[in-house]
Amino acid sequence: MNAESPESLIAVLRQAVIDGQAAAAASATERALAAGLPPRTLVDEALIPAMDEAGRLFECGEFFVPELLVAARALKASQALVTPLLAGSPTASAGRIAIGTVKGDMHDIGKNLVVALLQGGGFEVIDLGADVPPERFVAAVADDGADIVGLSALLTTTMLQMKSTVQALEQAGVRGAAKVIVGGAPVTQRFADEIGADGYADNAAAAVLLARRLMSRPA
Amino acid sequence: MTSRERVLTAMRRRQPDRPPFDLSFGFSTAQLETFRARTGAEDPYDYFEVDTRMVWPGPTRLATDFSGYLGPLPPGTVVDEWGLAHVPTSSAEGDHAHLVGYRHPMLHLESTAEAAAYPLPDLDASYRYEPVRAEIEDIHRRNLAAMAMLECTVFERAWYLRGMERLLLDFTDGNAFATTLLDRITERRIGQAQHYVRCGADVVAYGDDVGTQRGMLMSVRMWRTWLKPRLARTIAAAREVRRDVLVFYHSDGEVSAIIPDLIEIGVDILNPIQPECMDPVALKRAYGDRLSFWGTIGTQSTFPFGSQDDVRREVRSRIETVGAGGGLFLAPTHVIEPEVPFENIVAFVEAVKGEGR
C-alpha cells in the first residue's frame, strides 16, 4: 500500500476533518502540499466533502453538536495552512451569505453550526453575530453584496423579528438582490412562507443544501 | 383536595381531583406588566391559585470580585454570584433570562489548576437555607406544594461559566479541566439538594438542557460519560435525606433518548415535554407507569399562536390522555413570553380548573 499517494493523502485529510482530529488534519495538509498537491484540490476534494459528510452524519443523527464542533476545529487547522496559498488564485466561492441571529436574540450556537458548515461547504460567510438589527442585514446586501441572508432565532418572541427584517429588505429596495433563508427551534416552513422567506431548513446540514439550491437558481 | 395533596397525588401517579398546574418559570417582563394592568393584582401565582410555589436559596454573604475573569463589561451588565455576566441586549425585556447575553468568566482559562481555583458560590452554606425553611413552612401552611429550584444543575452552570462550545470541546478532548469544573459544581449542588430536602421541599427541581428541537445536543454516550453520573449523585444525595422526595428534571427539546436513564437514576417527573417535538401521549404509553409529566402545553405553538379554544382543547386532550390515572401536571412548556395573548393564559387556567370531577 502506498500510504502517501495523492489519493490517499486526500482521503486521510478528509477523514481527519470528519473525525475532528485537528493535529492529524494539519499534518495531512502539510504532507499533501509538500507532495505538490494544489491547495484548491485539497479544498475541493478533501475539505468540502469532509464537512458535507459531517453535516450528513449530523442530519441523520450519528453526529451531534460536539462532533460538528471538532470537525470545524480540524477544518480550521487545515484551512490555516491552505487559505494563504489560495490568495490570488481565482475564487470558487459557492456564494456569499450574510448570517446572524435576529435583533433581541443572543442565541448563536445553532447559527454558529450553520456558519461552520457553510464555510466548510465553500461559501463565503459574513457572520453578523447575534442580536443583529434589520439594518445590518440590509447593509450586508446593499454594501457587501450578499447573495443570501440567513436569519436565526430561538424564541417565538424574536422569531417575529424575521418578518421585520424581510420588510426592512423590501423597504430598502434590496429584497430582490438576495434570497432569505430562516431557521431556529420555533421556526417552521409555514412561518417561512408566511413572512415571504425563500427557504427554511430544520438543521445545519439542510441549510447548506438549501443555500446551494438557491445559488443554482437564477435570481 | 388541597393543592399540596393534588400535586403529591398526581406526581405519584394516582388520580387527583384535577391535574395540578402552574405557570412554568414565570412571566416575561412585558407579560407581567400586562398581567398587573389587566388584573390589578401583583402576583400571578396567587391570582391564578397555582398549586406550587418555587423557592431558591437566600442571598449570599460573599462578595466575590470576578473582574479579573471578565474584563471590562458594557454598561448595564449584571454579574451573578457564579461570575456569569448578564449583558443587556437590544431587547426591552431587561434581565429576562431568555433575552440577555452572556459573558463567560472561564472561557479563556487553560489549566486544571485554574478550574480548581475558580471561586464558586457558597450554595452549600447552611445560613442560606434559614429563609428557605421559613418559606416552605409558609407554603405548607397555605396547603401548597413547595418546589425547590436546582435549575441549571451541572451542565448548564458549567457551560455558563466556560462557554458552551468550549465546554463541549473539553468533553470531546476528555480533559481534566471539565472533570474538575463539573465535580466542583456537583459538590455544591449536592449540598444544595440536601439542604432543600431538610427544609421540607416536596419537589426538588433539577434541570440541564440537553435537547434540541430534533434530538439530543450531544450523543447519549457523551451524556452518560459526563452528565448522568453527576446528576445521579445529586439525586441520590437528596434521597439520602428523605426517600420519598419527588425528583423533577427539566430539559428543553427532544430528550426521549435518555428517558430510561433518567428513570434509572431516580427521576420521577419529566418537564416540560414540548409537544412541538415530543409526543406526550406516546411517552405516557411508554413510561406512564414509572414517570410523571409536567408541562405539555406548548409555548412555541398554542400559547403564542393558538386561539383560546385551541388552548382549552389542548388542556382537555391532555387531561383525557396523559392525565388518565394521574401522572400529569399541566403547565406552559416554558416562560410565558411577551407575545402570548393574556386571554390564552386565562383560558389555560380556566380549562384546568373546569375539569374537576
Image (cartoon, coloured by chain):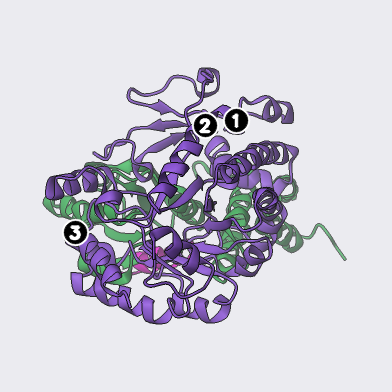
Name the element at disc 2. Answer: helix
Colour of chain B in the image:
purple
Between A73 and A86, which is closer to the camera in this rendering?
A: A73
Which residue does the numbered mark 3 point to in the structure image? B341
How far is mark 3 from mark 1, CA to CA? Answer: 42 Å
| Disc 2: CA contacts within 10 A as few (<14), some (14-19) or many (>=20) | few
Residue A109 location, x and y as percent? 47, 49
Q: Give yes or no for contact between labels 1 and 2 (Cβ–Cβ under 8 Å).
A: yes
The residue that mark 2 highlights is B130
In the rendered image, residue A197 lying in the magenta stretch gets the answer: no
Q: Is the magenta stretch mostly helix, strand or loop?
A: helix
- Secondary element under disc 1, as helix, strand or loop, is helix
Please give the letter of the chain rendered in green.
A
> Considering only vertical position in the picture, is B7 above or below B156?
below
Badge 1 local density, few (<14 within 10 Å), some, or many (20+)?
few
Question: Could you tell me if residue B191 is visible in this image?
Answer: yes
Amino acid at the residue labelled 1? Ser
- Range of the magenta residues? A204-219
Whether A52 is drawn above or below B202: the answer is: below
Measured Cα–Cα span from mark 1 to mark 2: 7 Å
Viewed as shown, does residue B274 lie left or right of A77?
left
Would you call the spot at circle 3 few (<14 residues within 10 Å), some (14-19), or many (20 or more)?
some
Q: With B83 as the anchor, is B345 left or right in this view?
A: left
Classify residue B195 by image quadrant. Answer: top right
What is the chain letter for disc 3?
Answer: B
Question: Picture coordinates of residue B266 (x, y %)?
Answer: 65, 61
Quadrant of the image for the N terminus of chain B? bottom left
> Which callout, 3 or 1, points at the residue further toward the start of the chain?
1
Q: State which quadrant residue A16 falls in.
A: bottom right
Q: In this view, does B134 lie to the left or right of A157?
A: right
